[in-house]
Image (cartoon, rainbow, N blue to C red):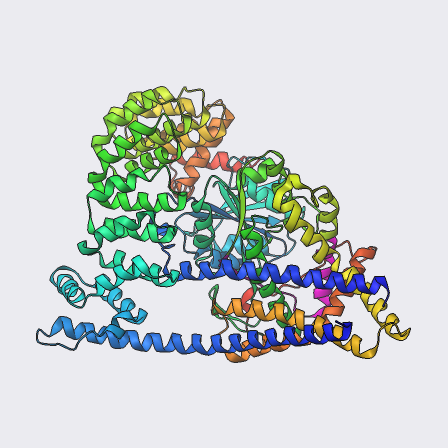
């Protein structure tokens, strides 16, 4: 086998070792978390007057189908003091009308602090229905622009940036803000556990029963989210080197977002860009800080349920990742950025950003070596089995970790996830690699956001 | 070792680990399902046993060692303990003592190496709140596990164990914020008994540290004991730490004593905007309409948060709403905006519309302000 072949195998082994290391560190972190969830007194925060208030910010663009359910789901969150700020980002459907009607909004003229730049604000509305809701109606400027406007309007020191297509677990705020209260001076950001809701039963803005859909595409994403949020983020959080706080669930100290200039409009990975900018900003200034991940803080979101939409999403994500990797290349293996620069970020670049390229090269190198006789059939089979086995191991560790949360009660659900851990290696995974290569090539079709085809969480949930 | 042999060993090892993980997953699934169902069933049965012990004097079914070690029994016991009051609670306490349940939990807390069991024991002791456990709980205020320290503080608070107050207060400056905040909640439960230890801590430490002192001040604010007003005014005078002064002003506002009026009034002209804003809010907390004219002046402050705080404070004072309506015509547009925001927050927009329907002239300025559009 040529040196390229050996390099590919070495890369693969290093990647799996890195993932395994993260999974084991995550397992240790989750073990303690499991005890605290059972016996800890997070509930005491609900009656404590020292609990910091939070502004929930939702960016909404043409979300008529789901915005009311989303706001209702947020309004019943168990937390002592919070406000909901919905930013209608120039929707051309009935998003604003639905909000005005349901929450009895009235246009008000109140001060607005333009700490961050955003497209012009047309009007501000306040609710009269008992829900502490403020709606910012602004001209279209994109998700990041809308969130920036929401951050400007936020009255509280912590902002929880999320989307309109999510269902919140009632305790998600109290669990995540516990991490802030633990160390208020240093904690600038908290990420939560994002789970796909496709297939689950939703009623009145609550998940009644979590379930795994029969359709393969969302099922594969459920496994992917479990791997990501349970077998790697707790490990990064333990190192204080979380490279991405998900855009669907990110709590930030408002003042820190303002310091770094808010979210970057037009960026396809604005959540990762923001997280990395905050890391760089605070590390450059030598400010002690931490950005943590809290697995018990759960939020449910709609994921693409067909290949066409998934393809568009993955191309967009990879374009975002490419830009972030380029923007923060100076942090890679830079000791000035400590564990972020030396472990987490290089790991992310090597095994997340470069992975599709290396795998793509492997598709040619390994069969070529086999055809030229440099690799015999038995060795090829063994290599493929090692690849399959290592990938499967990562998925199984993630599923074992997920079991302690008890979301999927039925054995059928777990069996489906185990099955998809094997099936995904035969087609789906390769497709993802191709989409990411497509993203790297650029050109038409890779620079737009595309539509998610939202149907509203209540309509989507329960679909198999 | 040849490459083939290496590959074979690697595949064997990887798939063996996979098989182990799969078995663990299946076992966890079975155990969790079984435990969830069985735990509920056992808990219900234990509730029955405890109810019979409580209601029948001559009932003597023993609470066995196995039973007392079962987490489901502890859950049943704590549920029942929280549901009972008066004589029934005392009877349950006697049953618990008679069967050595407290001693067992103390032993677990002292010597178990399982974090889950120690946490469960700490929760049980905190919930049962028996004086017998006070010494153990005091000792574990220095436990390496933060959650256990919190539970011990909570348990001592539940027992109202006075010697613990000084111990808890003295940890304010050294504890991690999550624990010290929960300790603060515990001290609030002690009420006025904690006032002087907190004041003593503040007096001694305010020149040297901020975190513990500000928490102690916030705790005093919640205890709401008038005895603290005089010493707090002295601390406000002496301290040069802005954070400490802000927390003192907050506490004075919460205590709501008229004695603080002059000191808070003077701070409205302080160089530090955060102190001006907090003083404005605190003046609102005193409930004295005499502060309105000074607060109206603060609504023209150069800092938006001070303007907003002053307007919100006015809204809460007797006659404040009328004063804010007047301020809508203020020559300073920022003051007018702050007044409008405070009126909207106070729910005046709805009242204004209703008043307008009844042709009440007072409503017009606010509606006109809203009509003028957002810019």
Q: Is residue A124 above or below residue A411?
A: above
Q: Residue B108, located in which quarter of the rendered image?
A: bottom left
Hey, which residue is sitting farthest right in the picture?
A372
User: Which residue shows up at 68% across the image and 72% down it?
Assistant: B10
Query: How far from the left and from the top, in percent, is residue A381?
Result: 77, 77
Residue A28 screen position, x and y as percent: 50, 60
Viewer-nearest residue: A335 or A449: A335
Residue B281 coordinates in the image, percent (x, y): 37, 31
Place residue B36 in its image quadrant: bottom left
- Residue A364 shown left or right of residue A205 in the figure: right
Would residue A264 be seen by someone viewing this image from the given angle?
A: yes
Q: Is residue B332 magenta?
A: no
For image coordinates 64% across by 76% down, the residue present is: B15
Residues rendered magenta in the picture = A295-319
* Residue A329 or residue A133, whichever sits in front: A329
Q: Nearer the viewer, residue B374 or B67?
A: B67
Q: Where, by quadrant of the figure, is residue B349 drawn?
A: top left
**On-image quarter of the N terminus of chain A:** bottom right
């Amino acid at each position: 086998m040529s040196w390229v072949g050996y390099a590919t195998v070495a890369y693969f082994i290093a990647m799996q070792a890195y993932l395994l290391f993260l999974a084991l560190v995550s397992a240790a972190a989750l073990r303690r978390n499991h005890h605290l969830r059972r016996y800890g007194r997070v509930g005491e925060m609900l009656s404590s007057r020292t609990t910091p208030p939070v502004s929930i910010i939702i960016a909404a663009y043409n979300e008529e189908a789901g915005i009311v359910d989303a706001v209702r789901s947020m309004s019943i969150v168990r937390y002592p003091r919070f406000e909901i700020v919905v930013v209608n980002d120039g929707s051309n459907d009935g998003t604003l009308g639905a909000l005005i009607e349901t929450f009895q909004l009235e246009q008000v003229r109140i001060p607005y602090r333009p700490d961050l730049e955003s497209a012009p604000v047309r009007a501000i509305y306040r609710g009269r229905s008992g829900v502490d809701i403020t709606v910012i109606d602004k001209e279209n400027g994109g998700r990041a622009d809308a969130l920036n406007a929401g951050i400007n309007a936020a009255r509280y020191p912590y902002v929880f940036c999320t989307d309109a297509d999510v269902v919140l677990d009632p305790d998600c705020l109290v669990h995540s803000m516990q991490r802030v209260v633990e160390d208020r001076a240093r904690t600038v950001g908290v990420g939560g556990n994002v789970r796909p809701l496709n297939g689950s039963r939703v009623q009145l803005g609550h998940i009644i029963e979590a379930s795994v859909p029969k359709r393969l595409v969302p099922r594969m994403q459920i496994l992917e989210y479990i791997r990501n949020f349970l077998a790697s983020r707790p490990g990064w959080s333990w190192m204080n080197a979380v490279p991405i706080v998900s855009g669907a669930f990110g709590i930030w100290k408002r003042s820190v977002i303002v310091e770094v200039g808010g979210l970057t409009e037009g960026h396809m990975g604005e959540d990762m860009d923001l997280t990395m900018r905050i890391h760089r900003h605070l590390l450059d200034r030598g400010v002690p800080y931490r950005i943590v991940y809290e697995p018990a803080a759960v939020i449910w979101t709609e994921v693409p349920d067909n290949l066409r939409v998934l393809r568009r999403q993955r191309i967009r994500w990879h374009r975002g990742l490419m830009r972030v990797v380029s923007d923060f290349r100076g942090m890679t293996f830079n000791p000035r950025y400590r564990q972020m620069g030396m472990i987490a970020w290089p790991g992310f670049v090597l095994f997340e950003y470069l992975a599709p390229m290396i795998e793509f090269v492997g598709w040619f190198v390994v069969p070529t070596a086999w055809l030229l006789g440099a690799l015999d059939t038995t060795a090829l089979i063994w290599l493929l089995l090692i690849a399959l086995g290592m990938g499967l191991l990562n998925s199984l560790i993630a599923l074992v970790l997920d079991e302690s949360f008890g979301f999927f009660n039925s054995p059928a659900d777990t069996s489906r996830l185990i099955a998809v851990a094997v099936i995904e290696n035969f087609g789906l995974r390769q497709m993802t690699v191709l989409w990411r290569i497509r993203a790297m090539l650029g050109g038409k079709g890779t620079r737009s956001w595309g539509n998610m085809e939202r149907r509203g969480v209540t309509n989507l949930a329960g679909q198999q | 070792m040849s490459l083939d042999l290496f590959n074979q060993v690697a595949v064997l090892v990887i798939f063996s680990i996979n098989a182990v993980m799969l078995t663990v997953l299946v076992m966890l699934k079975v155990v969790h399902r079984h435990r969830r169902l069985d735990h509920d069933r056992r808990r219900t049965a234990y509730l029955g046993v405890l109810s019979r012990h409580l209601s029948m004097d001559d009932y003597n079914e023993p609470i066995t060692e196995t039973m007392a070690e079962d987490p489901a029994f502890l859950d049943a016991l704590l549920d029942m303990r929280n549901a009972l009051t008066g004589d029934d609670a005392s009877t349950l306490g006697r049953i618990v003592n008679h069967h050595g349940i407290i001693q067992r939990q103390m032993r677990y807390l002292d010597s178990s190496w399982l974090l889950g069991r120690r946490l469960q024991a700490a929760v049980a002791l905190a919930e049962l709140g028996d004086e017998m456990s006070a010494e153990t709980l005091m000792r574990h205020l220095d436990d390496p596990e933060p959650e256990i320290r919190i539970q011990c503080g909570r348990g001592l608070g539940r027992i109202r164990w006075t010697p613990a107050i000084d111990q808890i207060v003295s940890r304010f400056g050294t504890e991690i914020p999550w624990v010290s905040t929960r300790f603060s909640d515990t001290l609030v439960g002690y009420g006025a008994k904690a006032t002087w230890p907190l004041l003593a801590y503040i007096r001694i430490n305010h020149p040297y540290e901020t975190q513990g002192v500000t928490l102690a001040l916030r705790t005093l604010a919640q205890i709401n004991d008038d005895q603290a007003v005089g010493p707090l005014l002295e601390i406000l005078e002496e301290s040069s730490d802005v954070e400490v002064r802000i927390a003192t002003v907050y506490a004075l506002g919460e205590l709501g004593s008229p004695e603080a009026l002059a000191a808070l009034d003077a701070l409205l002209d302080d160089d530090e905007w955060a102190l001006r804003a907090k003083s404005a809010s605190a003046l609102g907390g005193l409930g004295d309409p005499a502060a309105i004219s000074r607060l109206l002046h603060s609504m023209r402050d150069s800092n938006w948060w001070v303007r907003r705080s002053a307007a919100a404070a006015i809204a809460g004072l007797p006659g404040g709403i009328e004063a804010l309506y007047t301020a809508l015509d203020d020559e300073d547009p920022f003051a007018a905006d702050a007044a409008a925001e405070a009126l909207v927050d106070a729910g005046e927009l709805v009242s204004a519309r209703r008043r307008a329907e009844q042709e009440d002239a007072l409503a017009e300025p606010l509606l006109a302000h809203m009509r003028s559009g957002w810019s």
